[in-house]
Amino acid sequence: MVITKKPVEIESLGEISREIRLDILDMTTKAGSGHPSSSWSSVEILIALFFGGILNFNPVDPWWPERDRFIMSKGHAAPLLYAVLARAGYFDPDEIWRLRQIGSPVQGHPIQRMMPGIEATTGSLGQGLSAGIGHILGGRLNNLDYRVYVLLGDGECEAGQIWEAAMAASHFKCDRLTAILDYNKFQETGPISREMALEPLVEKWSSFGWNVVEADGHNIPDLIEKMQFIKDVKGKPSILIAHTIKGKGVSFVEADFTFHGRALTPEQAEKAREELLCS
Amino acid sequence: MQLGQIAGLETSKPMRDIFGEALLDVCKENPKVVVLDGDLGNSTKTEYVRQTFPDRFFNIGIAESNLVGIGAGIEACGFIPWITSFSSFLLCNAYDQIRLAVAMSNINAKILGSHGGITLGKDGPTQMGIEDIALMGGMPTMVILVPGDPTSMRAAVKAATDHIGPVFLRSSRLPMPYVYPRDNCPFQIGKANIVRNGDDISIIACGIMLGIAMDAAAILENEGMQARVIDLHTIRPLDVGTIVKAARETGAIVSAEEHLLQGGVGSNIARIVTENHPVPMRFVGLEDVYVESGDPFELLEKYHMTATDIVTAARFAYAAKKSGEK
């Protein structure tokens, strides 16, 4: 059994990030819809997990019971998930170009097990963390000690189910559960601070019994270091609050939150491509 | 007063006890079965499993969305979760979670909605699941079981557990009469049972209305009308064959359910009947109304869901059949 545990050389992770960003651009532009800015925001987080030596996974045996789990709770970042899973070898990379097309398994939002590596159906926000707890409890019953990572959006933390799960994960002492919060500070209709304030987030998660760590969400070595550190925390779940920029990598998308939920026009896409290639 | 009394049927202990025992039995048989509770284990009687298999029992607390989500996660690890609570709380709080994590994901999870219908009685309309069958009807992959007899309940719990895929099992609180023998009943998901033969009219019932339908059939017999009583324990997939055969052979149908008529079992039957062999139909169930607290039997009477109401409906349907109405 081949287990992709050995990290890709850290120097090349930046280049992979760039290529994943280009994949997301091309997928969503071709589909004519999707959430490129939300996907770009989380790129380094997934690169650190999948290629930075954090996750134990095996694309040849995707449902290997001892695998670490990655659950994309912010399901609208599906293009990112598909691009990373394809790059990791879960399926034919050409599949990703069928995003959002009829008859394709590459759905607009992820459907559990419709493609190898998709652990949960998400897209109605707030649901992924509960699934993560279930994987931890199931792992205990099976005497397996894998870890579970759940990527949360920040707007998603307005949902009550997140806090139900936060309470339960702490109650069940899920120390193998790590939530990663893509804290890009924007939700669909505007800045989070204006629409529905989340702060003080560190105190909120701490008061629910979580170990809270913060990181620069676009700094891969920083993310890897913090994720490694969290692996040694016992007795409580951890959350890595990753400070990110929505639309990261493309200046005019970074500057305009209204890009949430829409693809770039072909002209914008060309401009974005130039920026990504020059970065 | 007891259900099934007119038909001379014996009554069981409360159905929640029957369910709790049956759930414990499947836990004993199959080590992959786990139970999740929304802090109502002493009412739903999942507490029997908690006492016997504490490691396989999880009280998730009063948080139905999380309850469903965690259950789905455990399922992904190879277990068969029974996700349990009152029908009203579970379905109305966690409809979206059941939709995505269970039905759309098409996972092997089982959902108990207890205290369905109005006969939980005195706790009042906030606790009554009068819309649960319609809600579950909105989930294409979901098998829907509404057993109407204690033996059938035991069989349904086992059949639901053995079935691969999402299943909703609805139970209600009142004791039910034994329509089947205590030790055995035919129970195949999607296959309705004819529990009383007759060719003048068909009464198609589920849940507690099955025993009430048996009472109605006994009354009708005294009037010289032979009613076929069909136990429609599975609402999805519907037993089209048995329903069409009933329409063809008896020429008139009454449906009986402890549920809103809007979107309920009767409307599902009517679609099959009108499409295949239109015959006069009448519908016994809850009209568009939220009922109030009260004694279960008084509620059934006030809201027209008694044997007498089925008899009246049967007379109308039979008269329509005789006059050639379609």
Image (tube, rainbow, N blue to C red):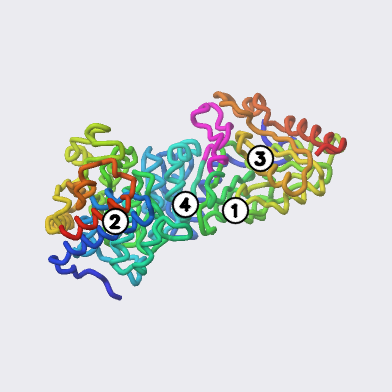
What x and y, as percent, mark residue A117?
35, 62
What x and y, as percent, mark residue B80?
45, 56
Q: Is residue B218 above or below residue B78?
A: above
Residue bearing the label numbered 1 = B155
Residue bearing the label numbered 4 = B104
The label shown at residue A25 is: 2
Give the amino acid at mark 4. Met
Residue A67 inside the magenta-drawn segment: no
Residue B127 inside the magenta-drawn segment: yes
Rendered-image quadrant of the C terminus of chain A: bottom left
Label 4, label 3: how far apart the Cα atoms are: 24 Å
Residue B179 placement, left or right of A81 = right
Point 56% across, 51% down: residue: B143
Q: In this view, does A259 lie above or below A194?
A: below
Residue stretch in magenta:
B114-136
Q: Are marks 4 and 3 in contact (CB under 8 Å)?
A: no
Residue bearing the label numbered 3 = B267
